[in-house]
Image (cartoon, rainbow, N blue to C red):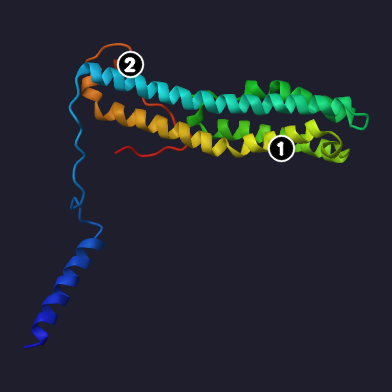
Amino acid sequence: MKRIPFILFAAFCLAFYSCKTDKTKTTKTTTDRVIAKKTDTQVKADLDNLLQEMDATWNEMIASDDQKIDNLQTLLARVGRDKNYDKSQLTTLLAERENLKTKRYDRQQIKDVTAVDAYDSAQIKLMDATYQLIEANNLAARDTIAGQLASKIQEDDSRVPILRAYYDKAAKNFNQYLKDYQPQIQKLGPPYSEMKPAPLFVEQPLL
């Protein structure tokens, strides 16, 4: 008699395991998301706020990048004030720095990984060459400002993944809202009905 409960328990476990591992089953295990009902005024206000948040994170990222490029310019200028430097190399780096911003992606181009990678590669190449130039003549050790600039550039560069993640989060929130309230948004008229999902650096599935 003691074997009966065990047999029943084993049968239950086998059935449960089969359900969990059978890839052909489509049993829904999660509850549907509940989309709160909102007035048109509320939806417009929400969209405006989401756009502002997305703009703010994008602008912060670009401002940080601009600062990094400007600091590179200043650092290269410090190199030019020193007596011991490779003039030909400095001229090349100044020209590359001058053209760097023209290579930067815009908000629509970030969905193209190659465009982002191309800009990142150009910037990394410029930074590495600049560091090699100041190390060749030990400038950072002799020029406090040059050393501080080099450290600030490295600090700003380390924040790039963080700032991009902030933007992606804001963009995903915006995209999710567009999806959740799409039928209502279409009835609001321009500019709301014309809003499109924003590209992300790293594509993420919506709920």
Q: In which quarter of the image is residue 146?
A: top right
Residue 45 versus residue 144 in the image, above or below: above
Query: Which residue is painted at 72% across and 21% down in the image?
Result: 98
Viewer-proximal residue among 192 and 116:
192
What residue type is disc 1 on?
Ser
Going by the picture, which residue comes out furthest to the front?
A: 144
Residue position marked by numbered label 1 in the rendering:
151
Query: Which residue is painted at 25% across and 30% down in the image?
Result: 180
Of callouts 1 and 2, the N-terminal one: 1
Q: Quadrant of residue 150?
A: top right
Q: Image quadrant for the C terminus?
A: top left
Q: Can I make out residue 196 in this image?
A: no
Q: Can I make out residue 65 in this image?
A: yes
**Label 1 Cα crowd, 10 Å radius (few <14 / some 14-19 / many 20+):** few
**Residue 6 in the image: x percent, y percent?**
14, 81
Disc sitting over residue 194 in the figure: 2
Q: In which quarter of the image is residue 102?
A: top right
Single out the mark in the foreground, 1 or 2: 1
Left or right position of 198 against 44 = right
Left or right position of 117 against 143 = left
What residue type is disc 2 on?
Glu
